[in-house]
């Protein structure tokens, strides 16, 4: 392939990626609003792309919505990976992920609404918080940090607490997100087997400075 041909192909791939990202952002906006019944034409208008471009990337609106949720989950998971990197205690890794996610309900409200509007499916999702939380629960249990009979049920407990917290923070803007999240994290750590003193210590440790970090999700 000539240099000019390679450059043209590169531009085409960038345009395709831009169009796909625009469609996913538009879909996430509709999901966040709880509006799943909009026609494809309305989605393409919101994305500012042509109707034909939609079918170059997705076979159906349902496929687009699945891609939009997957994108939000993966962005969330990568964010948590970055902010928990280097922690050696799986109990602290678990707690930090929970505490950061609780804060994201206010810091990334559109992403949060995407997650909340798909909360039943998140427990068994293979992306985002669920597989990482399950990994940390299993590791903390194996290390003797948690006392858990069934890690999957512990994940259900964690997910239910987190989604309930998100709903509360959305409906109660007067609640302090950080204080509420840390208090719930402390209670959850105690439930999973830590002593009250250690649960309080871990759930009150300093977190990375979120103001210096850029959220990388499409939904934000």
Image: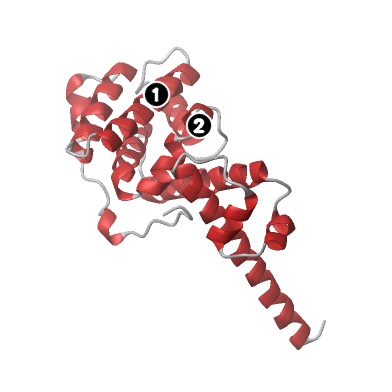
Residue that label 1 marks:
160
Query: With respect to residue 25, does 105 lie above or below?
Result: above
Residue at the limit of the structure toward the right, as seen here:
1
1 or 2: tag closer to the N-terminus: 2
In the image, taking residue 116 as reference, residue 203 lies left or right, namely left
Residue that label 2 marks:
122
Residue at the limit of the structure toward the top, as seen here:
149
Q: Position of residue 60 (x, y in %)?
A: 70, 46
Residue lying at 45% horizontally and 44% vertically, measured from the top left: 32
State which quadrant residue 90 falls in.
top left
The C terminus sits in image quarter: bottom left
Residue lying at 47% horizontally and 20% vertically, measured from the top left: 151
**Badges 1 and 2: C-beta atoms under 8 Å apart?**
no
The N terminus sits in image quarter: bottom right
State which quadrant residue 13 falls in.
bottom right
Residue lying at 65% horizontally and 41% vertically, measured from the top left: 62
Query: With respect to residue 218, does 128 lie above or below?
Result: above
Would you say residue 85 is visible in this rendering?
no
Q: Position of residue 75 (x, y in %)?
A: 48, 50
């Amino acid at each position: 392939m000539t240099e000019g041909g390679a450059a043209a192909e590169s531009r085409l791939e960038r345009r395709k990626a831009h169009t796909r990202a625009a469609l996913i952002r538009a879909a996430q906006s509709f999901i966040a609003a709880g509006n799943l019944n909009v026609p494809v034409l309305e989605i393409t208008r919101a994305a500012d792309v042509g109707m034909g471009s939609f079918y170059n990337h997705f076979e159906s609106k349902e496929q687009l919505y699945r891609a939009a949720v997957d994108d939000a989950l993966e962005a969330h998971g990568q964010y948590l990976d970055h902010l928990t990197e280097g922690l050696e205690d799986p109990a602290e890794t678990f707690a930090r992920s929970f505490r950061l996610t609780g804060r994201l309900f206010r810091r990334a409200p559109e992403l949060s609404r995407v997650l909340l509007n798909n909360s039943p499916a998140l427990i068994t999702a293979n992306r985002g918080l669920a597989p990482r939380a399950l990994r940390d629960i299993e590791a903390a249990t194996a290390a003797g940090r948690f006392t858990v009979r069934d890690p999957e049920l512990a994940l259900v407990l964690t997910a239910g607490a987190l989604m309930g917290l998100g709903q509360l923070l959305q409906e109660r803007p007067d609640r302090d997100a950080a204080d509420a999240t840390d208090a719930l994290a402390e209670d959850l750590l105690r439930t999973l087997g830590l002593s009250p003193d250690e649960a309080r210590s871990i759930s009150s440790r300093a977190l990375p400075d979120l103001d210096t970090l850029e959220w990388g999700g499409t939904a934000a």
